[in-house]
């Protein structure tokens, strides 16, 4: 299996797990998770980081934020 396919599978698995976890979190826990989603920002902004890694981190950062928003809206 190619590395890209493995990354995609890992990403989809992580998204599925994260979506489930968000569904059972309290509001305070959701806020903490939102803070964790922002932890990818330093890697995205680091000019010494490999461009491919920075791009991957940007994509994951966006996906995590989208999942958090979906999970949060489901329980409002």
Image: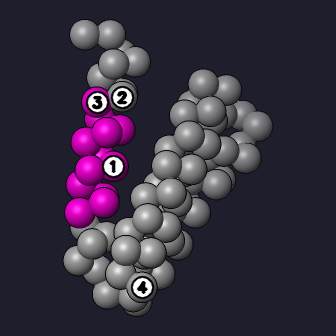
x 61%, y 42%: residue = 58
Q: Which residue is mark 2?
A: 8
Q: Earlier in the sequence, mark 1 or mark 2?
A: 2
Q: Which residue is mark 1?
A: 15
- Image height check: is 68 above or below 46? below
- Kindly report the distance in space between the C-alpha atoms of the residues bearing marks 2 and 4: 30 Å
In the displayed orientation, state which residue is furthest to the top.
1
- Kindly report the distance in space between the C-alpha atoms of the residues bearing marks 1 and 2: 10 Å
Q: Earlier in the sequence, mark 3 or mark 1?
A: 3
- Image height check: is 4 above or below 66? above
- Kindly report the distance in space between the C-alpha atoms of the residues bearing marks 4 and 3: 30 Å
Q: Position of residue 15 (x, y in %)?
A: 33, 49
| Main secondary structure type of the part rendered in magenta | helix
x 65%, y 53%: residue = 42
x 60%, y 25%: residue = 52
Residues at badges 1 and 4 in contact (C-beta under 8 Å)? no
Q: Which residues are magenta?
A: 9-20
Q: Which residue is mark 4?
A: 76
- Image height check: is 33 above or below 41? below
Q: Which residue is mark 3?
A: 9
In reply to whether residue 59 is colored magenta, the answer given is no
On screen, residue 34 versus residue 28, left or right, reads right
Residue 29 visible here? no
- Kindly report the distance in space between the C-alpha atoms of the residues bearing marks 3 and 1: 10 Å
* Residue nearer the viewer, 35 or 30: 30
């Amino acid at each position: 299996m190619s590395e890209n396919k493995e990354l995609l599978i890992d990403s989809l698995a992580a998204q599925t797990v994260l979506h489930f976890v968000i569904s059972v979190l309290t509001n305070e826990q959701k806020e903490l998770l939102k803070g964790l989603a922002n932890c990818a920002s330093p890697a995205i902004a680091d000019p010494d980081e490999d461009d491919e890694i920075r791009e991957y981190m940007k994509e994951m950062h966006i996906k995590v934020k989208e999942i958090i928003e979906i999970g949060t809206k489901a329980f409002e």
